[in-house]
């Protein structure tokens, strides 16, 4: 015979229904739906919940255990992986921010990579530095730009005799 569920749902059916309508993601909706079915008596057996939600019995058991231990808050808690630790942080980050804000800032991202290695002992890849400085720090490098018109004009004048000679033959 199928296993009967013995669990007391503390929230009212109306509260669960409203919460279900306001749920922000599918994970919360599934769990609230499960509680609502149990509270309204529409589902009475463990395997029925698994079939209706498309989840394994182990998942249903884990969800019910979370609810028993910490109530609705524990059941709806969203856990996320912490992700990788930032390469540039703490004192090195402060030094970098100060240097980027100073008049003698960096001329290239390669220069930042070398500076981080020498000043802070950090080996950070060029792409990481480039993305971090542009996207996270929203900083722009202070590169002095030469006017482009004159050097191009000089180059064209120097190459003109060679071009004419090659196309005359």
Image (cartoon, rainbow, N blue to C red):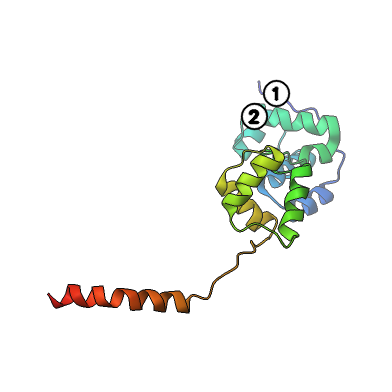
Residue 153 percent across, percent down from the top left: 40, 79
43 or 152: nearer the eye?
A: 152
Relative side of 155 to 97, left or right: left
Residue 141 percent across, percent down from the top left: 64, 61
Residue 24 percent across, percent down from the top left: 72, 53
Residue occupying the point 83% across, 51% down: 14
**Residue 20 appears anywhere in the view:** yes
Q: Which mark is residue 93?
A: none
Relative to 162, residue 3 above or below: above
Residue 47 percent across, percent down from the top left: 64, 29
Relative to 143, residue 148 above or below: below
**Residue 80 appears anywhere in the view:** no
Relative to 77, residue 156 above or below: below
User: Which residue is labeled 1 in the image?
Assistant: 3
Relative side of 58 to 101, left or right: left
116 or 47: nearer the eye?
A: 116
Residue occupying the point 75% across, 60% down: 102
Viewport quadrant of the N terminus:
top right
Residue occupying the point 60% across, 53% down: 131
Label located before the other in sequence (2 or 1): 1
User: Which residue is labeled 2 in the image?
Assistant: 47
Check disc 2 and report its element: helix, strand or loop.
helix
Relative to 144, residue 25 above or below: above
- How many marks can you see? 2
Residue occupying the point 28% across, 77% down: 160
Check disc 1 and report its element: helix, strand or loop.
loop
| Residue most extreme to the left | 169
53 or 3: nearer the eye?
A: 53
Q: Are marks 2 and 1 in contact (CB under 8 Å)?
A: yes
């Amino acid at each position: 015979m199928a296993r009967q569920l013995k669990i007391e749902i503390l929230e009212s059916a109306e509260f669960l229904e409203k919460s279900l309508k306001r749920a922000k993601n599918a994970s919360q909706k599934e769990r609230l739906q499960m509680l609502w079915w149990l509270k309204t008596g529409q589902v009475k057996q463990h395997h029925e919940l698994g079939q209706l939600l498309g989840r394994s019995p182990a998942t249903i058991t884990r969800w019910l255990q979370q609810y028993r231990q910490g109530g609705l808050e524990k059941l709806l808690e969203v856990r996320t992986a912490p992700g990788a630790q930032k390469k540039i942080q703490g004192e090195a980050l402060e030094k970098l921010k100060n240097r980027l804000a100073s008049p003698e800032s960096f001329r290239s991202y390669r220069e930042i990579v070398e500076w981080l290695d020498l000043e802070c002992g950090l080996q950070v890849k060029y792409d990481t530095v480039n993305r971090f400085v542009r996207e996270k720090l929203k900083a722009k490098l202070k590169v002095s730009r030469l006017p482009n018109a004159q050097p191009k004009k000089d180059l064209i004048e120097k190459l003109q005799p060679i071009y004419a000679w090659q196309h005359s033959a």
